[in-house]
Amino acid sequence: MIKSLHKRKSELAQSNKQLEILSNGIFQKGELPTFKDKIFETGQFPLKAKKLEILQINVGYMCNQVCSHCHVDAGPDRKEIMTRDTMSQCLEVIKNTGAHTLDLTGGAPEMNPNFRWFVEEASKAGIKDFIVRSNLTIITANKKYNDLPEFFKKYNVHVASSMPHWTKGKTDKQRGDGVFNASIKALKMLNAVGYGMPNSNLRLDLVYNPSGAFLPGNQKSLEKDFKKSLLEEFNIQFHNLFAITNLPISRFLDYLIASENYEDYMYSLVEAYNPSAVANVMCTNTLSISWDGYLFDCDFNQMLELPVNSKVKHISDYNEDLLEGRNIVISQHCYGCTAGAGSSCQGSVA
Amino acid sequence: MQKTYYDPADLKKFGKISEWNEELGAKFFDYYGKVFEEGALTEREKSLIALAVSHTIQCPYCIDAYTGDGLQRGITKEEMMEALHVAAAIRGGASLVHGVQMMNKVNKLDM
Ligand code: SF4
Ligand code: SF4
């Protein structure tokens, strides 16, 4: 198992080092336009936050996996975990805003000791779509997690599971040896309680991201291929596939640099820039909350330690009026959200 | 002047071909785009055909382009390699089948 950048004491574990790479080199030399210049051309700068619809809460960076592309730099050696106090502050906000979607992420969110308590409490708040980003293998990793499918079902949680490919080779290469078989087992367990079945309300979506330095293809045709293979080979069903572009930050940035793909990858992101994806990037209606309660425009900005551009910095000071209409903090990583059909935590946006 | 015949960066400039003859360039790219749309064959199948043909015509730009295209579509390296063997088999077979002509000629000329 590889170690997180953090544990390896890699200089890329520092967000300012990542931002330096993203702002200098090809962008400084003017070989490629900066994201700001690019959206300025179409009158979309500054990017403004609209009304809050999605609250994305990162409940900790601890994970049972160490995927090579992880933008969180998560892993078993990461100990950052959201406390129950911070969770309670999040719950207050959920109750008092019109946000219709709650999106729990991590690391493996299920590894936070207060995870179940939080799900139970949040489910009382009348959220329309309550998503848990599950890496699947956590369900089979340890006996204490084996009942997660029933637990999710009890609270009608929407499960969004990562799956980079329908073959073992590609999946294990990105996410670690044994991940494919464990994921298949977990998907069967979810199907067994009714998740992902054609007429079921128990939503099971798969999240696909490319296993290398290339962009995702068409979401619909990938979904078709995933559905066909998983059904024919494993009798597994799911609802939708979200195709997500890998953003050039953290461990994926480390991989891009080590494999000498960084410049070409940035070129392909800029080349695939789609102005119509800009209007719907997720930061415009989402707020991302870190394990220690700080506010960010998105999970990527959280990892780059780029806080919201507002007087309100922490969930304990949440103020809808002050946050709405704020200018979103951008850098070159944002090209990842606006390439091709666009990309957000819920897949294509354009 | 660069010292090699092929420069990977030139692939990105392919569209510029139209600059010196807009009408024919546009016709070509229209046609090209249409060819690769889903029809009786899926886009995925067409991508694999293109990859195989690129190897037969030995165009490094096309090889790069359709390898990348295949990865984006989730095509596996095993599928890509099989497509390549189809190209190689046809290519090899095409040489070999001309052996019949050689045999005919030998049979005609030889006493
Ligand atoms: S990508 Fe997800 S499953 Fe993989 S290490 Fe990161 S948080 Fe864990
Ligand atoms: S990375 Fe994407 S979601 Fe985050 S600020 Fe940039 S465009 Fe918005």
Image (cartoon, coloured by chain):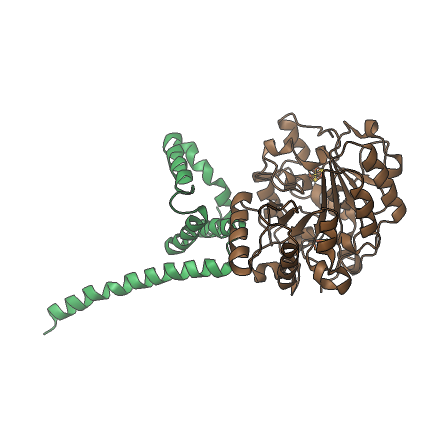
Image quadrant of residue A342?
top right
| In-image side of A234 versus A36 (left or right) | left
Instruction: Find the residue positioned furthest to the bottom.
Output: B111
Q: Quadrant of the C terminus of chain A?
A: top right
Q: Is residue B6 visible?
A: no
| In-image side of A84 versus A52 (left or right) | right
Vertical position of residue A340 compared to residue A229: above or below:
above
- Chain drawn green in the picture: B
Q: Is residue A211 visible?
A: yes
* Residue A315: % across, % down: 86, 38
* Residue A272: % across, % down: 57, 39
| In-image side of A180 versus A306 (left or right) | left
Q: Quadrant of the N terminus of chain A?
A: bottom right
Residue at image location 63% in from the left, 41% down from the top: A343
Q: Which quadrant of the picture is home to ligand 2?
A: top right
Residue at image location 41% in from the left, 50% down from the top: B50
Query: Which is more toward the observer, A337 or A39?
Result: A337
* Residue A310: % across, % down: 83, 31
Query: Which is more toward the observer, A42 or A90?
Result: A90
Vertical position of residue A178 compared to residue A20: above or below:
below
Image quadrant of residue A48?
top right
* Residue A307: % across, % down: 81, 39
Query: Which is more toward the observer, A81 or B9?
Result: A81
Query: Color of chain A here?
Result: brown
Image quadrant of residue A345?
top right
